[in-house]
Structure formats: structure tokens, C-alpha cells
Image (cartoon, rainbow, N blue to C red):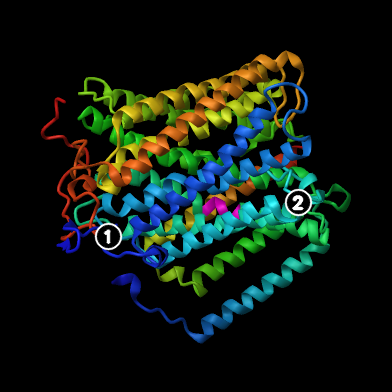
């Protein structure tokens, strides 16, 4: 079956992804020193979301899966993004 | 094939014998029964705790227990009922027993994981029970574990939190199993829109289980970390926020209400066509209303927090969304009633319970809108009105649907039939007892009686006393119903394969079903609710 095929990423891809993740981790640590007020957490969450997306896409092979599975995972992310956004709206207007 | 010693056809109940054959079985039907027996035992424990609380409140002042004992009782009553009985309830019991059969599969996608889920569930359930008795300090936070009290209380809060955390895993694993089963194991020809509506409701429920439950898991871990390491997630003195806990808790716990009620809606959606001998009215709207409830249900959690100090903008936003979620619920009610309209209605016990479900759930729904309205919420928040509303939804909704389900699928599960007369009498006791128990709480709640108080002003005594009398009637009804079902599961008249003239797949196989459900994988060629030969009864 199609989704039982093996996909082996090249070493260079894996190392590149790892490097990007380390750079993003460094950025998220450095971002603490930038005074963004209530948006500090938002920035941290955005960086974390980018990292999660990269991990899912390459390390967890979502890139090679069928459209339905990608839509389902994407839907989950959209849902959580909305939930977090709604929570932040409360903090922003308080 | 028959069991040679008894000449009874081999089925999932008798193809293997002995306790170990049950404890190690990966048969979805046996696992469903394991859930049912465990849930029934825990339900009885929590119901007795509920009765004791009602006895305490039969008169003002202390009667049979101290205030601290009362606090512990309503906490453990809530933890058992919510996390151990109601959330797994219909999905774990009837979902397990019937989902594979109704979609034409031989089992769920991951049978071993299914059994593992039950062991995880049992571990969590016993931890919850243990928290009540360990060291003589039963948790007293309420099932909601609100901070700052839960972060500071000296009772067994950590054990109770761990129990809820472990139970969450069982819920996630079951949800995952069901989603994969529905996606991958439907019989040939069973397209999405040829799938019966109970599996559809389980599908919507499973998504909530796997998406929302991790949030409560993390939240409970945060409380444990708060108690153990004093991190300050929820402590303003350390830069935290107690309202954040309420957000995180209700982001899970409101969708969890739909984990409880969506399968209940699925159950009655199966019952109405069968006992009206008529196709379900509005199949597609019912499907989409299930998915809409699951989706919109994610975004209404803030209506539990109107008085908690949340921003005004958030309050009207959540209030608006709360009113929106009533629309798909109402669509279902209209469809159920329209299904019966013009049908050959046969008022057997399953239908009696299903109609009661509509009545009680509608009262619970309307009072939910009362609470979802910002102005009235200020008056009613934290009163017995909330307790009444909640029980009308959860017990009147999920509870009565559970009773409907067991009366509906009992002959399929055990191959025997219960006594109709006793089923009807127990229904009468349950229905009258339920309303007498909970309706007075609406009234005294409006008058200002706060919830979770073991004592009260004498002006509330009439309502409290009526409620206690109702509790006794309800318990009597429960006892009658259980006695009728337990006795007839072994001694009842042998049931035919299709005693109700149902048309979904479970009624096309023998009662009780064979070990692997179908001798041959069925091929589905038409919609699920076509009654070719309506029974006039």
C-alpha cells in the first residue's frame, strides 16, 4: 500500500533540519532578552510552532504522507492555534 | 459450530472460558464488557456517595457527616463519576462492543492496544479510589481541582491528580483506536455516508478524546509541579495566574462534556429509527451536527469562567459561541422527533429511555443557555442551579442514553431478553426519582442556595428534602434495573438475532455474536436505515 512505502531522507537533509532547529532554539533563548511585553510568549510560541512543523515534516515524514493525513494533522494544528489565540485574547484585553 | 458440552452455538462469551480468558482477551466485545462491569461497579460506589450527601442535606445543620467529610465526598463523587464513569462510559462500553460490528469489521484496528487501554483505565480508577482513603486525607478540591486551593491543600490531591492523568491515557488510546478503525476497517461498500450514526458519533467523540485530553494531562502535571516544586505557573506572587489554570482546565473539560454526550446522541439516533420502523430523518444533517458540536464545543470553554475575572471581551465572545453550539444540538432533537413522526412507534423500554433522554437533555440544554447568558450567569453561578443543569445534561443525557443503550443491545450482547415489565417499572422509578432529585435544585439555586455547601439556610429545606426523597427513589430504580438486567443476562428467555427488527449490521448476525463477528466480511450495497418490511407490531 502506498502509505506503507519507506521514505529514507538523505543525511544532508537530516543535518540541515537539525541545524535549523538548533538555530531556532538559540533564537528563542535570545528572544527572552528582547522586551516585547505581553508578546514575548507569543514570539516563543511562534518559534516553537515553526520547529514543530519542521520536525513533523521531515523527521516524522509527514511530507511523504497522503493529503488526507496532512490535512488531519494541519487541522489539529489550526485548532490548537485558535485555542491558544482565544486564550491570549483574554490576557490582551484584561 | 457449537460448544459440544452444552450444544450452545460458539460465540464470544463461550468460545473460551475462565477468568484469564477474559483478562487477556483482545476481543473488542469482551473488552467492552470488562469496561461495562468496571464502570457499573464504580458508578454504584459514586451513586452511594451521592445518596449519603443527599441524606446529609435532608435537614439543616450536621446530620450524618462533618463538613470536611462532605467536601471529600463531593470531590470523589465527581472524580469517579466524571473521569471513571461518564467520560469512558458509552464510547468505551458500547463503542467497543458495537463499533467494529456496525462497520462490518472483525475487531478494532489495534486489539492489543485496546486491552492495554482497559488496564490503564483500571489503574487510574483504583488510584482515584485509593486517593479517597489513603492516609485519611481524601481530596477536597472538587473534581475541578481549582488552584490556588489544589496547589496548597494538605489532602491527597496529588494522588487524585495522578489518577485523572492516567485515566486520560486510556481515553486517548481508545479514541486513537476508534479513529483508525473507522478510517481503515470499514467493510467493502461502506462509504462514509453509509456508516450508521452511532459510529459517526464515536468518530466525532474520538477526535475530541485525542485532541483535548492531552491538555488536561499537562494541566494536571502543572498542578503537581506547582505543589512539588512551587514553580509559580498559577501563583501571582511568582508571576503566574490562577485564571490560566481555569482556561487550561476548561479547554479540556468542556469538550469532555461532548465526549460524554455525543455517543449518547449516537445511541438514541440508532433507537428511534428501529422503534419507529422508519429511516432516520435527516441523516446528513445529523452527521454534520455531530461534527459541528465536536468542533464548536472546543471554543466555548470560557462560559465556565464568566465570574472568574476574565476580560469583558472574552466573556461576550464565549457567550456568543455558547449560543451557537445550541444550533446543532437542536438540529438533532428535531431530527429525532421527526424520525418518530408518522412511524410505527413501539414503546418498548429502549425507546422509553431514549424519549426520556430527549426530555431531560432538552431541560439541561435550555438551562445551559440560561447559564451561558452573561447577565443571568452572574446570579446563578456557583449555585445549585448549576448542579441541576449539569446533572440534567450528564445523568439525564448520558446516563439515560446509557440505560437506553443497554436495554437496546442487551439481547445482542447476551443472547437473552430481560423482563419488559420490570424494565418499565424501573424506568418509572428512575424518571420520577431523577426529576424529584434534581428539579428542586433549579428552584433553590435561583433562590440563592450555593453549591458544595453541607449546611444551608432553613428556607431551602423543602427543596433539599424533596431532592433527598428523589435520591432514594432513583436509587430504588437503579437497583431494580440492575437486578432485572443481571438476572436475565443468565436466566432470561433466549433472544432471537433481531428482536427489534433493526436494520444495521449488528442485527444481521447471531446473538450473541461469534468471536470474530462475521463468517464472511459483509459487502454493503445500500444506506444504513432502509426498512424494507416495516413491522406493524
Q: Residue furthest right?
A: B237
- Residue B324 visible, this orientation: no
Image point 34% across, 52% down: which residue?
B97
**Viewer-nearest residue: A21 or B261:** B261
Q: Residue furthest bottom?
A: A11
Quick one: quadrant of the N terminus of chain B?
bottom left
Q: Which residues are magenta?
A: B211-215
Q: Is B252 located above or below residue B326 in the figure? A: below
On screen, residue B222 versus residue B195, left or right, reads right
**Viewer-nearest residue: B464 or B448:** B464
- Residue B261 visible, this orientation: yes
Chain ID for label 2? B
- Binning the other alpha carbons within 10 Å of mark 1 as few (below 14), some (14 to 19) or many (20 upward) gives some
Q: Quadrant of residue B453?
A: top right
- Residue on which the image places disc 1: B14
Q: Quadrant of residue B79?
A: top right
* Mark found first going from the N terminus, 2 or 1: 1
* Majority secondary structure in the magenta region: helix
Residue B129 placement (x, y as % from top left): 62, 52
Amino acid at each position: 500500500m502506498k502509505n506503507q512505502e519507506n521514505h529514507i531522507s538523505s543525511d544532508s537533509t537530516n543535518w540541515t533540519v537539525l541545524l535549523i532547529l538548533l538555530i531556532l532554539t538559540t533564537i528563542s533563548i535570545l528572544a527572552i532578552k528582547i522586551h516585547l511585553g505581553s508578546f514575548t510568549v507569543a514570539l516563543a510560541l511562534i518559534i516553537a510552532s515553526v520547529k514543530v512543523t519542521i520536525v513533523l515534516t521531515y523527521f516524522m515524514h509527514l511530507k511523504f504522507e497522503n493529503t488526507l493525513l496532512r490535512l488531519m494533522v494541519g487541522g489539529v494544528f489550526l485548532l490548537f492555534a485558535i485555542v491558544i489565540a482565544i486564550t491570549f485574547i483574554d490576557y490582551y484585553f484584561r | 459450530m457449537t460448544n459440544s458440552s452444552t450444544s450452545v452455538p460458539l460465540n464470544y462469551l463461550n468460545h473460551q472460558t475462565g477468568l484469564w480468558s477474559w483478562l487477556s482477551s483482545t476481543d473488542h466485545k469482551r473488552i467492552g464488557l470488562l469496561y461495562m462491569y468496571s464502570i457499573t461497579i464504580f458508578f454504584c460506589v459514586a451513586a452511594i456517595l451521592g445518596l449519603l450527601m443527599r441524606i446529609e442535606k435532608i435537614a439543616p445543620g450536621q446530620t450524618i457527616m462533618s463538613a470536611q467529610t462532605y467536601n471529600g465526598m463531593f470531590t470523589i463523587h465527581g472524580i469517579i463519576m466524571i473521569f471513571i464513569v461518564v467520560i469512558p462510559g458509552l464510547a468505551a462500553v458500547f463503542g467497543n462492543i458495537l463499533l467494529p460490528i456496525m462497520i462490518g469489521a472483525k475487531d478494532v484496528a489495534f486489539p492489543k492496544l485496546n486491552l492495554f487501554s482497559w488496564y490503564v483505565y483500571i489503574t487510574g480508577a483504583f488510584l482515584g479510589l485509593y486517593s479517597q482513603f489513603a492516609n485519611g486525607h481524601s481530596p477536597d478540591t472538587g473534581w475541578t481541582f481549582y488552584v490556588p486551593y489544589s496547589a496548597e491543600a494538605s489532602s491527597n490531591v496529588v494522588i487524585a491528580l495522578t489518577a485523572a492523568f492516567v485515566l486520560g491515557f486510556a481515553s486517548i488510546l481508545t479514541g486513537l483506536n476508534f479513529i483508525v478503525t473507522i478510517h481503515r476497517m470499514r467493510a467493502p461498500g461502506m462509504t462514509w455516508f453509509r456508516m450508521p450514526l452511532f459510529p459517526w458519533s464515536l468518530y466525532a467523540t474520538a477526535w475530541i478524546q485525542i485532541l483535548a485530553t492531552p491538555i488536561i494531562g499537562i494541566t494536571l502535571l502543572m498542578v503537581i509541579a506547582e505543589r512539588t516544586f512551587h514553580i509559580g505557573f498559577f501563583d501571582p506572587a511568582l508571576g503566574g495566574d490562577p485564571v490560566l489554570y481555569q482556561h487550561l482546565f476548561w479547554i479540556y473539560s468542556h469538550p469532555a462534556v461532548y465526549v460524554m454526550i455525543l455517543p449518547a446522541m449516537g445511541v438514541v439516533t440508532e433507537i428511534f429509527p428501529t422503534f419507529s420502523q422508519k429511516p432516520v430523518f435527516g441523516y446528513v444533517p445529523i452527521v454534520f451536527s455531530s461534527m459541528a458540536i465536536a468542533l464548536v464545543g472546543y471554543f466555548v470553554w470560557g462560559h465556565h469562567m464568566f465570574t472568574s475575572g476574565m476580560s469583558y471581551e472574552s466573556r461576550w465572545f464565549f457567550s456568543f459561541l455558547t449560543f451557537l453550539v445550541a444550533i446543532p444540538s437542536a438540529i438533532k432533537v428535531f431530527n429525532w422527533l421527526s424520525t418518530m413522526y408518522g412511524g410505527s412507534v413501539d414503546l418498548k423500554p429502549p425507546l422509553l429511555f431514549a424519549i426520556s433522554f430527549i426530555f431531560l437533555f432538552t431541560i439541561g440544554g435550555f438551562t445551559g443557555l440560561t447559564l451561558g447568558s452573561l447577565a443571568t450567569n452572574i446570579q446563578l453561578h456557583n449555585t445549585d442551579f448549576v448542579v441541576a443543569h449539569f446533572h440534567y445534561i450528564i445523568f439525564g443525557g448520558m446516563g439515560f442514553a446509557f440505560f437506553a443503550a443497554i436495554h437496546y443491545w442487551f439481547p445482542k450482547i447476551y443472547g437473552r431478553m430481560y423482563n419488559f415489565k420490570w424494565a418499565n417499572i424501573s424506568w418509572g422509578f428512575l424518571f420520577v426519582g431523577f426529576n424529584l432529585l434534581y428539579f428542586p435544585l433549579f428552584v433553590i439555586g435561583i433562590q440563592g442556595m450555593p453549591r458544595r455547601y453541607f449546611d444551608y439556610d432553613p428556607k431551602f429545606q423543602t427543596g433539599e428534602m424533596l431532592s433527598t426523597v428523589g435520591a432514594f427513589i432513583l436509587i430504588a430504580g437503579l437497583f431494580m434495573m440492575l437486578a432485572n438486567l443481571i438476572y436475565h443476562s443468565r436466566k432470561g428467555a433466549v433472544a432471537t438475532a433481531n428482536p427489534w427488527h433493526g436494520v444495521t449490521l449488528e442485527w444481521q448476525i447471531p446473538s450473541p455474536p461469534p468471536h470474530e463477528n462475521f463468517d464472511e466480511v459483509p459487502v454493503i450495497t445500500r444506506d444504513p436505515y432502509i426498512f424494507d418490511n416495516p413491522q406493524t407490531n
